[in-house]
Image: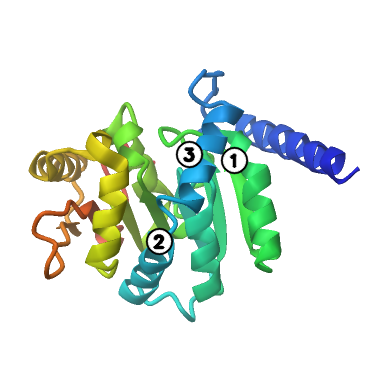
Amino acid sequence: MMELLHRFYFLALILFFCVAGCLNDKALSLHPDEKYTEQNAHGMIRASRKTLAPVYAPLAEQIVSDFDLSEKDGIGIDLGSGPGTLIVELCKRTRMHWINVDINPNFFPNFYRQAEENGFGHRVSAIFADAHSLPFRDNYADIIVSRGSYHFWEDKVRAFSEIYRVLKPGAVAYIGRGFSRNLPVKAAKKIRAKQGKKMQYDVNNKANELYNIMNELGIKDYRIDRSKPPGSENVNYGIWVEFRKTEENVHIKGGG
């Protein structure tokens, strides 16, 4: 009986957010894709519970500390959150409402169960959407984060312009892949060993790509974060970009 109820709520949520997206002129008509299957979602859920399990709590701690979120109210978005494990960790450390935005809705039943089990079911939402066309009004979110998603976006300039559009003036985004600077080196080495060659990439090239995106969009207030904790010389900690929507530069190329 409970399984039937979960399926009913899942289908109802998809229908609701699809209809809501159709009412928003920024919404994208999403097409089925064989990559966004239930099997694909379950694979990432398993990874979030095993290989990547040590990543989320330190990253949430860093985000909350860097952007002074512990006593802040408002809306946070995790773009491409998938299983939503980072959101649960952020809920533990903030009072904010967090939204899981993902193009694969098969993640959502697990995400809601995880939030409910941790006592945060009332402070989370999930929206089926594409990073290239976010179904939110301009100047909506207090912070947007994304880990391990941006490198899959086909048109990164468009996706980053959407993030900028949705941020409130003065709000911040923290987008990237890899680890937080406070993840112990031993844990980082263990994760990279399990991942093997599939997560090998040139961090300098990725940094240049992010520099170019920021410059093309005319975003001035940004920094590229390439963490190298002591003892991590042979470990790829990843690449992140932090940027803010400044009051004097609300409208940018490609934005709202």
Identify the residue at image location x=12%, y=39%: 202
Q: Nearer the viewer, residue 169 or 240?
A: 240
Q: Which quadrant of the rendered structure holds the N terminus? A: top right
Q: Is residue 137 above or below residue 58?
A: above
State the CA–CA distance, disc 3 to disc 1.
18 Å
Is residue 125 something that shows in the picture? yes
Mark closest to the chain's N terminus, 2 or 3 = 2
Mark 3 or 1, closer to the camera: 1
Q: Are marks 3 and 1 in contact (CB under 8 Å)?
A: no
Residue 61 is situated, as x and y percent measured from the top left of the image, at 39, 72
Mark closest to the chain's N terminus, 2 or 1 = 2
Residue 33 is situated, as x and y percent measured from the top left of the image, at 51, 19
Q: Which quadrant of the rendered structure holds the C terminus? A: top left
Q: Return the residue at label 2.
A: 54
**Position of residue 229 in the picture relative to residue 170 (left or right):** left
Q: Secondary structure at mark 1?
A: helix
Q: Secondary structure at mark 2?
A: loop
**Position of residue 3 in the picture relative to residue 185 (left or right):** right
At label 3, the amino acid type is Leu
Mark 2 or 3, closer to the camera: 2
Identify the residue at image location x=29%, y=55%: 190
Residue 107: assigned label: 1
Q: Is residue 33 above or below residue 171?
A: above
Q: Is residue 144 above or below residue 151?
A: below
